[in-house]
Image (spheres, rainbow, N blue to C red):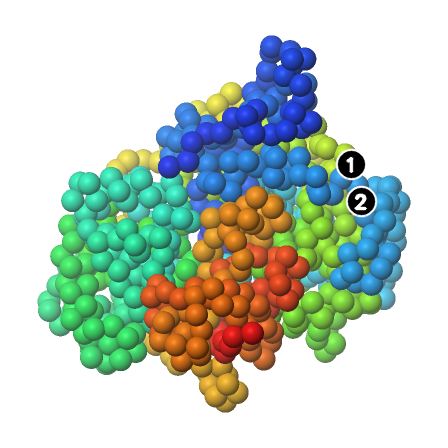
């Protein structure tokens, strides 16, 4: 087959994006009942390449050794220079914790109790597909295809099981699809508005930076393979600044921690611009040649003087001035952002303001200078998306996309035309990950809603399903692991046969397509054939990298031209080719007060941050693994001493955090890691495993961010609560 010319639009890039550990030998950890008796093992082992499937910027390469169909060794691939043979703590025991977990679902299940009770009986694949297909046909006949909602997300970010076959299936049906805006829904389009791209400084090139601002990202914990590059830069003389309303693990390691009030990042960035312009620290030549809108920006930021910004952000004026001057004089300066900056009403404008800064100072001119954001466009350019994105060329397509952030509202809205009558949930656990969880629960309790879930475990969401189908794990299927945080592509080989009756997500949609009477050839392609064809591309990033190479090596780094200075002389991805401080389709970023109700203002005085602050959980994954849950301990609330004293709270007291949406029982941790008036709760605990049966997203609001492109991002952090002792 001739290699294909890759064709993918900038919008598709976004939709596709729309983000000290040693290698572990499980033979010393896993029980003999799982691994088999060592005395009877053959001496020959087979080795397989794989990649972590989690929604994470690191996308770690791994190796698996198998004897007699059982995993005997599992760990990071030491040959990959970026992930360097290291896996995070939650993944070191992945085979035991997920693939071989005694509670794993291994047969299709049909509900026999009330929704939410978790009462099911085993059913054959043949019968389950028959029943789901018949009910689905009836739903479409009565209410139309848009009454069916596809709710897949990033429970695996590996490309095949994430969406390749499911996207074809729902495109063929013309169903409704969920807009993937819950993470990245504001920060990605905001950066695209300014720079026309999410690409910038390459991860490894951080070592050349001499002034690094880690803005709203807990790099040491959530981007662990980037952290060594931070340390290398510091060793070479870089100063490390962290901007974060919480004293994270990364903030503790910083040379300077800037701690603004939550949601005020946009004001801080505009205040920095005020100082940089007033002090004459701009790169006027860069501005004149490679940007647009400077005159308007210069006038706009006059109202963001240090005193005004100090009042908004709760920061000393001198800190704002010092940060601006140091950043402008960095040689070179780098700002690193991911998604932490976006989860508030001002999240879009906060991102736009930060994205402007490197062009204002000309930081893009030097290696290691500029903005580091996401890298998903690399795979969008390199791989054969004519095959991976085949659904975009089908004659039938989904006609509407609905907000993932507001899934609870969608399921409870009888005026939605048509209303949602059937939902397919895969690679997602919205009862844990979506805000306003009690509203989502109410929607999933509807008896007139056909709910089908593909899962490894009986999750909080699966309990509300009519049918649950057992999905394979990353050790049991073919896949491709691209990354939104680094430059390596991985192949995932099935190391063992699927346990029980588990099947890949792709196979579920093939079987259901057949039942629905969809006869197109695209539903007959095997996963291996799709993986193989993905590397059938003539893009220079894949020079010398084909399926055979990936089979042998497991991973490859894209052939990126070096030095990579994408905006040294402009060349932005905007329509004008310039960094657009303001464009015909946008306005200048500005700080806006959050519109809280009178009830919220009077009865719920504390702002709640819900963050990924656990070591053992990832989004909604791993929270059911007992040894990881024991290490994390009881769900807790960080509360400042002033707020604790005002409520007579002592360290370790049992508390109730509550608002109009829910109430959570948890333990007090009195700390100065947050500011007075702010409390902080970790995200990822399963409500059913927490006293009281509710967790962080039972409190959060499903309000949207300021930027509404593609449905609007999630303003999780604009949540207000009250806290009392129980």
Is residue 194 visible to the viewer in this orientation of the structure? no
Query: Pointers 1 and 2 in contact (CB under 8 A)?
Result: yes
Q: Name the image quarter holding the N terminus.
A: top right
* Looking at the image, residue 29 lies above or below residue 177: above
* Front residue (pair 278, 634): 634
Q: Which residue is mark 1?
A: 501
Q: Classify residue 485 as left or right of residue 441.
A: left
Q: Secondary structure at mark 2?
A: loop
Secondary structure under the numbered disc 1 in the rendered image: loop
Above or below, 123 relative to 442: above
Q: Position of residue 457 (x, y in %)?
A: 69, 47
* Residue displayed at 21% across by 62% down: 360
Residue tagged 2 = 108
**Residue 320 position within the rendered picture, expressed as x and y whole percent measured from the top left:** 20, 69
Sort mark 2 into few (<14), some (14-19) or many (20+) by Cα contacts within 10 Å.
Answer: many
Task: Point out the image quarter for the C terminus.
Answer: bottom right
| Number of numbered discs overlaid on the protein picture | 2
Q: Is residue 421 left or right of residue 376?
A: right
Local crowd size for mark 1, using a 10 Å CA cut-off: few (<14), some (14–19), many (≥20) = some
Q: Quadrant of residue 470?
A: top right
Q: Is residue 468 visible?
A: yes
């Amino acid at each position: 087959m001739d290699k294909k010319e890759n064709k993918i639009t900038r919008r598709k890039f976004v939709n596709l994006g729309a983000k000290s550990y040693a290698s572990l030998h499980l033979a010393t950890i896993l029980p003999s009942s799982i691994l088999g008796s060592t005395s009877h093992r053959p001496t020959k082992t087979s080795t397989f390449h794989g990649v972590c499937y989690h929604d994470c910027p690191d996308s770690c390469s791994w190796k698996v050794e198998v004897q007699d169909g059982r995993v005997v060794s599992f760990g990071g691939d030491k040959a990959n220079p970026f992930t360097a043979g290291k896996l995070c703590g939650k993944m070191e025991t992945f085979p035991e914790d997920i693939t071989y977990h005694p509670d794993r679902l291994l047969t299709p299940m049909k509900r026999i109790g009330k929704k939410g009770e978790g009462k099911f009986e085993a059913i054959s694949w043949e019968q389950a597909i028959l029943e789901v297909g018949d009910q689905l046909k009836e739903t479409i006949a009565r209410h139309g295809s848009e009454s069916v909602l596809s709710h897949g997300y990033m429970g695996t970010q590996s490309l095949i099981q994430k969406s390749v076959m499911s996207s074809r299936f729902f495109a063929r049906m013309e169903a409704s699809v969920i807009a993937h805006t819950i993470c990245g829904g504001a920060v990605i389009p905001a950066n695209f508005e300014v720079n026309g791209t999410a690409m910038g400084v390459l991860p490894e090139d951080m070592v050349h930076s001499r002034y690094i601002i880690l803005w709203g990202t807990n790099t040491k914990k959530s981007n662990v393979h980037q952290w060594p590059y931070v340390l290398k830069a510091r060793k070479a003389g870089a100063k490390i600044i962290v901007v974060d309303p919480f004293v994270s693990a990364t903030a503790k390691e910083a040379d300077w921690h800037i701690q603004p009030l939550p949601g005020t990042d946009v004001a801080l960035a505009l205040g920095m611009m005020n100082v940089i312009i007033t002090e004459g620290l701009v790169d006027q030549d860069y501005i004149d040649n490679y940007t647009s809108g400077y005159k308007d920006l210069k006038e706009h930021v006059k109202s963001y003087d240090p005193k005004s910004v100090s009042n908004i952000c709760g920061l000393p004026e001198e800190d704002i001035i010092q940060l601006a001057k140091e950043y402008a004089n960095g040689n070179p300066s780098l700002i690193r952002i991911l998604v932490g900056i976006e989860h508030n009403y001002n999240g879009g404008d906060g991102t736009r303001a930060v994205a402007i800064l490197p062009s204002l100072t000309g930081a893009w001119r030097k290696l290691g200078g500029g903005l580091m954001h996401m890298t998903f466009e690399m795979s969008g350019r390199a791989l054969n998306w004519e095959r991976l994105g085949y659904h975009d060329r089908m004659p039938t397509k989904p006609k509407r996309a609905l907000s993932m952030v507001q899934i609870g509202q969608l399921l409870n809205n009888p005026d939605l035309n048509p209303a949602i009558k059937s939902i397919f949930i895969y690679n997602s656990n919205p009862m844990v990950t979506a805000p306003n969880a009690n509203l989502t629960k109410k929607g999933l309790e509807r008896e007139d809603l056909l709910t089908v879930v593909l899962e490894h475990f009986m999750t909080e969401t699966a309990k509300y399903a009519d049918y649950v189908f057992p999905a394979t794990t990353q050790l049991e299927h073919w896949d491709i692991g691209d990354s939104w945080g680094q430059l390596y592509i991985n192949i995932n080989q099935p190391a063992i046969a699927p346990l029980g009756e588990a099947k890949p997500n792709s196979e579920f949609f093939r079987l259901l397509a057949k039942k629905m009477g969809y006869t197109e050839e695209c539903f007959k392609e095997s996963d291996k054939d799709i993986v193989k064809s993905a590397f059938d591309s003539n893009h220079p990033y894949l020079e010398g990298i084909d399926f055979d190479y990936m089979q042998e090596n497991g991973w490859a780094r894209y052939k990126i031209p070096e030095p990579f200075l994408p905006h040294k002389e402009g060349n932005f991805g905007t329509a004008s080719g310039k960094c657009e401080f303001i464009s015909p389709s946008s306005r200048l970023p500005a700080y806006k007060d959050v519109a809280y109700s009178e009830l919220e203002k009077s009865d719920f005085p504390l702002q709640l941050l819900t963050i990924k602050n656990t070591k053992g959980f990832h989004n909604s994954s791993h929270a059911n693994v007992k040894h990881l849950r024991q290490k994390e301990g009881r769900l807790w609330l960080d509360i400042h001493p002033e707020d604790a004293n005002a409520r007579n709270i002592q360290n370790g007291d049992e508390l109730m955090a509550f608002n109009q949406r829910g109430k959570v029982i948890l333990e007090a941790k009195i700390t100065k890691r947050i500011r007075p008036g702010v409390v902080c709760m970790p995200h990822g605990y399963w409500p059913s495993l927490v006293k009281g049966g509710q967790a962080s997203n039972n409190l959060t609001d499903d309000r949207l961010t300021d930027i509404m492109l593609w449905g609007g991002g999630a303003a999780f952090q604009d949540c207000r609560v009250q806290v009392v002792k129980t």
